[in-house]
Amino acid sequence: MSASDPLSALESVIRNRMGADPDSSYVARLHAKGRAKIAQKVGEEAVETVIAALAQDKAALTGEAADLIFHLLVLLAECDLTLEDVYAELARREGVSGLVEKASRAPE
Ligand SMILES: N=c1c2ncn([C@@H]3O[C@H](COP(=O)(O)OP(=O)(O)OP(=O)(O)O)[C@@H](O)[C@H]3O)c2ncn1[C@@H]1O[C@H](COP(=O)(O)O)[C@@H](O)[C@H]1O
Protein backbone atom coordinates (compact mmCIF):
# COMPACT_ATOMS: atom_id res chain seq x y z
CA MET A 1 0.00 0.00 0.00
CA SER A 2 1.17 3.52 -0.78
CA ALA A 3 2.97 5.39 2.00
CA SER A 4 0.83 8.42 1.06
CA ASP A 5 -2.29 6.51 2.13
CA PRO A 6 -3.17 8.01 5.55
CA LEU A 7 -4.22 4.68 7.04
CA SER A 8 -1.00 3.00 5.93
CA ALA A 9 1.04 5.90 7.28
CA LEU A 10 -0.77 5.70 10.64
CA GLU A 11 -0.31 1.92 10.67
CA SER A 12 3.46 2.38 10.21
CA VAL A 13 3.63 4.95 13.02
CA ILE A 14 1.64 2.63 15.31
CA ARG A 15 3.98 -0.30 14.61
CA ASN A 16 7.00 1.88 15.38
CA ARG A 17 5.47 3.28 18.56
CA MET A 18 4.54 -0.11 20.05
CA GLY A 19 8.10 -0.49 21.27
CA ALA A 20 8.43 3.12 22.44
CA ASP A 21 8.58 4.44 26.00
CA PRO A 22 5.07 4.21 27.52
CA ASP A 23 5.68 7.55 29.24
CA SER A 24 5.83 9.28 25.87
CA SER A 25 3.55 7.14 23.71
CA TYR A 26 -0.15 6.29 23.97
CA VAL A 27 0.34 3.33 21.61
CA ALA A 28 3.14 1.97 23.80
CA ARG A 29 0.91 2.38 26.88
CA LEU A 30 -1.87 0.41 25.18
CA HIS A 31 0.60 -2.26 24.07
CA ALA A 32 1.87 -2.57 27.65
CA LYS A 33 -1.70 -3.08 28.89
CA GLY A 34 -2.19 -5.96 26.45
CA ARG A 35 -4.57 -7.31 23.84
CA ALA A 36 -7.64 -7.52 26.08
CA LYS A 37 -7.40 -3.82 27.01
CA ILE A 38 -6.92 -2.83 23.35
CA ALA A 39 -9.90 -4.97 22.33
CA GLN A 40 -11.95 -3.32 25.09
CA LYS A 41 -10.98 0.12 23.74
CA VAL A 42 -12.16 -0.92 20.24
CA GLY A 43 -15.47 -1.98 21.76
CA GLU A 44 -15.86 1.31 23.64
CA GLU A 45 -15.04 3.38 20.57
CA ALA A 46 -17.48 1.31 18.50
CA VAL A 47 -20.26 2.00 20.99
CA GLU A 48 -19.41 5.73 21.06
CA THR A 49 -19.49 5.72 17.24
CA VAL A 50 -22.95 4.15 17.21
CA ILE A 51 -24.23 6.65 19.78
CA ALA A 52 -22.92 9.61 17.74
CA ALA A 53 -24.49 8.21 14.56
CA LEU A 54 -27.88 7.70 16.21
CA ALA A 55 -27.68 11.21 17.68
CA GLN A 56 -27.18 12.47 14.13
CA ASP A 57 -24.14 14.39 15.39
CA LYS A 58 -21.82 14.50 12.39
CA ALA A 59 -18.94 16.21 14.20
CA ALA A 60 -19.04 13.66 17.04
CA LEU A 61 -19.41 10.80 14.57
CA THR A 62 -16.34 11.97 12.65
CA GLY A 63 -14.29 12.08 15.85
CA GLU A 64 -15.53 8.74 17.15
CA ALA A 65 -14.96 7.09 13.76
CA ALA A 66 -11.35 8.35 13.83
CA ASP A 67 -10.91 6.97 17.38
CA LEU A 68 -12.43 3.65 16.30
CA ILE A 69 -10.22 3.30 13.23
CA PHE A 70 -7.12 4.27 15.23
CA HIS A 71 -7.81 1.70 17.96
CA LEU A 72 -8.68 -0.97 15.38
CA LEU A 73 -5.29 -0.39 13.73
CA VAL A 74 -3.63 -0.78 17.14
CA LEU A 75 -5.55 -4.04 17.71
CA LEU A 76 -4.59 -5.38 14.27
CA ALA A 77 -0.93 -4.57 14.96
CA GLU A 78 -1.16 -6.19 18.39
CA CYS A 79 -2.53 -9.34 16.71
CA ASP A 80 0.22 -9.21 14.06
CA LEU A 81 -2.22 -8.45 11.26
CA THR A 82 -1.91 -5.65 8.72
CA LEU A 83 -4.19 -3.48 6.63
CA GLU A 84 -2.95 -5.52 3.67
CA ASP A 85 -4.56 -8.59 5.27
CA VAL A 86 -7.86 -6.71 5.61
CA TYR A 87 -7.65 -5.29 2.08
CA ALA A 88 -6.98 -8.80 0.75
CA GLU A 89 -10.10 -10.08 2.54
CA LEU A 90 -12.19 -7.21 1.12
CA ALA A 91 -10.83 -7.91 -2.36
CA ARG A 92 -11.67 -11.59 -1.94
CA ARG A 93 -15.25 -10.64 -1.05
CA GLU A 94 -15.45 -8.30 -4.03
CA GLY A 95 -14.47 -11.26 -6.16
CA VAL A 96 -17.14 -13.42 -4.59
CA SER A 97 -19.85 -10.76 -4.91
CA GLY A 98 -18.79 -10.20 -8.52
CA LEU A 99 -19.36 -13.89 -9.19
CA VAL A 100 -22.73 -13.79 -7.41
CA GLU A 101 -23.80 -10.81 -9.51
CA LYS A 102 -22.69 -12.59 -12.68
CA ALA A 103 -24.54 -15.77 -11.70
CA SER A 104 -27.75 -13.84 -10.95
CA ARG A 105 -27.79 -12.17 -14.39
CA ALA A 106 -30.27 -13.54 -16.90
CA PRO A 107 -28.67 -15.87 -19.45
CA GLU A 108 -27.68 -14.03 -22.64
N1 LIG B 1 -4.38 8.91 16.07
C1 LIG B 1 -4.12 8.85 17.28
C2 LIG B 1 -5.15 8.79 18.27
N2 LIG B 1 -6.50 8.81 18.16
C3 LIG B 1 -6.97 8.72 19.42
N3 LIG B 1 -5.95 8.64 20.31
C4 LIG B 1 -6.01 8.56 21.76
O1 LIG B 1 -7.02 7.68 22.11
C5 LIG B 1 -7.50 8.03 23.42
C6 LIG B 1 -9.00 7.90 23.40
O2 LIG B 1 -9.52 8.61 24.44
P1 LIG B 1 -10.27 7.92 25.65
O3 LIG B 1 -10.79 9.04 26.50
O4 LIG B 1 -11.25 6.93 25.14
O5 LIG B 1 -9.11 7.10 26.39
P2 LIG B 1 -8.19 7.53 27.59
O6 LIG B 1 -9.03 7.93 28.75
O7 LIG B 1 -7.15 8.54 27.13
O8 LIG B 1 -7.43 6.15 27.84
P3 LIG B 1 -7.94 4.87 28.67
O9 LIG B 1 -7.39 5.05 30.05
O10 LIG B 1 -9.43 4.77 28.57
O11 LIG B 1 -7.27 3.73 27.95
C7 LIG B 1 -7.00 9.46 23.71
O12 LIG B 1 -5.99 9.41 24.68
C8 LIG B 1 -6.43 9.90 22.36
O13 LIG B 1 -5.29 10.73 22.51
C9 LIG B 1 -4.81 8.67 19.63
N4 LIG B 1 -3.51 8.59 20.05
C10 LIG B 1 -2.54 8.66 19.11
N5 LIG B 1 -2.82 8.79 17.74
C11 LIG B 1 -1.70 8.86 16.78
O14 LIG B 1 -0.94 7.69 16.94
C12 LIG B 1 0.43 7.98 16.66
C13 LIG B 1 1.30 7.48 17.80
O15 LIG B 1 0.93 8.15 18.99
P4 LIG B 1 1.84 7.97 20.30
O16 LIG B 1 1.92 6.52 20.58
O17 LIG B 1 1.17 8.75 21.40
O18 LIG B 1 3.19 8.53 19.93
C14 LIG B 1 0.57 9.50 16.47
O19 LIG B 1 0.59 9.72 15.08
C15 LIG B 1 -0.74 10.02 17.06
O20 LIG B 1 -1.17 11.18 16.41
Image (cartoon, rainbow, N blue to C red):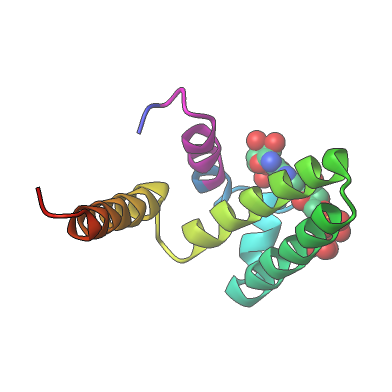
Looking at the magenta stretch, what is its main secondary structure?
Answer: helix
Residue 101 on the magenta segment: no
Q: As drawn, is 68 to the left or to the right of 83?
A: right
Q: As drawn, is 5 to the left or to the right of 30?
A: left
Residue at horizontal 46%, vertical 22%?
4
Residue at horizontal 78%, vertical 49%?
64
State which quadrant residue 59 falls in: top right
Q: As drawn, is 104 to the left or to the right of 72?
A: left
Residue at horizontal 11%, vertical 54%?
107
Q: As drawn, is 62 to the left or to the right of 5?
A: right
* Residue 35 spot, x, y in % from top left: 58, 72
Instruction: Between residue 10 and residue 92, name the one nearer to us.
Output: 92
* Residue 30 spot, x, y in % from top left: 68, 61
Does residue 33 lie above or below 64 as drawn? below
* Residue 27 spot, x, y in % from top left: 65, 52
Residue at horizontal 65%, vertical 67%?
38
* Residue 86 spot, x, y in % from top left: 39, 54
Q: Is residue 18 visible?
A: yes
Quadrant in which the N terminus appears: top left
* Magenta stretch bounds: 3-14
Instruction: Between residue 45 and residue 80, name the one nearer to us.
Output: 45
Does residue 80 lie above or below 88 as drawn? below
